[in-house]
Image (cartoon, rainbow, N blue to C red):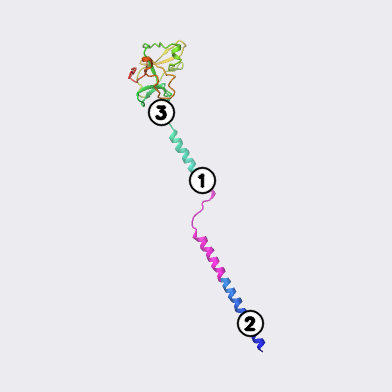
Amino acid sequence: MLEDEKTTRSRTYLGRIALTCLVGGALFLAACNSDDDNGDNGDTTAVPTVTETETATETATATATETETATETPTATETADADTTLRVEEEGDLAPFLVDADGMTLYTFANDEDGVSNCDADCEANWPPLTVEAGEEPTAGEGADGTLGTIERDDGTLHVTYDGQPLYTYTADTAPGDTNGHEVGDLWFIAEPDGSASAS
C-alpha cells in the first residue's frame, strides 16, 4: 500500500516537471518569434536594388557629360574670331593689339612702305609673314576696323596688310599673347587696331 502511494507521488511529481518544461519551452519559443518579428519590422531603411543603383549612376554620368559639353562649347564670338584671319587681343600689358587666328601677336616692320614688304628671305626666317591662301580674302574680328588687303610676295604667297602695313608674326613668341618682338631693333612693333605702330 505504501509502495503504491510512493509510486503515485513520484509519477505526479515527474508529470509536474514535464508540464513545467513544456510551458517554459513554449514561452521561450514565443519570445524568440516576437524578437524576430521586431527585428524585421524595426529596420525600415529601403535598400536600393541593383537596377535603381545603375540607373542613378547612369543619370549622374549623363549629367556630368552634359555639364562638360556645355562648358566646352565655344560662344558665337569665339567661333567667329577663330574663323577670322586676325582679331584684337584685349588682354596683356600692351593691349589692345592685333593677333592672328591662333592668338599669336602681329607686328609691323618700320622699314616697310605702304603696301610694300622690305622683309627679305633672311628676315622671314624670324618674322614669318601673315598670309592667306590664293583666292581667299583676309577677314577681321570685332574691333579690327582697319582696311585689309594682300600683297604678293616674291614666292607668290599672299601677304596680309592692315591699313597698308604688312603684318608678321615672330618666331620667339611661343604662346598666344607673347609680345617678345615688340621694339626689337627699334624696327618691329606690335600692330595696333587703329593702324598705328606702337612704340610705347
Residue wearing tag 1: 55
Which class describes the residues within 10 Å of circle 2: few (<14), some (14-19), or many (20+)?
few
**Relative to 164, is 92 above or below?**
below
Given residues 152 and 127, the one toward you in this image is: 127
Which numbered mark, 3 or 2, is in the foreground of this view?
A: 2
Question: Do the CB atoms of the residues marked 1 and 3 lie less than 8 Å apart?
Answer: no
Of the two numbered discs 3 and 2 on the same chain, state the one appearing first in sequence: 2
Which secondary structure lies at badge 3? helix
Question: Do the CB atoms of the residues marked 3 and 2 lie less than 8 Å apart?
Answer: no
**Relative to 58, is 157 above or below?**
above
**Relative to 76, is 8 above or below?**
below
Mark 1: which amino acid? Thr
Counting the numbered discs, the total is 3
Residue wearing tag 2: 10
> Magenta stretch mostly in which secondary structure?
helix
Q: Residue at x 53, y 51 (%)?
A: 49
Bounds of the magenta span? Answer: 27-51
Q: Residue at x 53, y 48 (%)?
A: 51
Of the two numbered discs 2 and 1 on the same chain, state the one appearing first in sequence: 2
**Relative to 154, is 13 above or below?**
below
Q: Quadrant of residue 143?
A: top left
Pick the quarter of the image with the C terminus.
top left
Residue wearing tag 3: 78
For residue 42: magenta? yes
Of the two numbered discs 1 and 3 on the same chain, state the one appearing first in sequence: 1
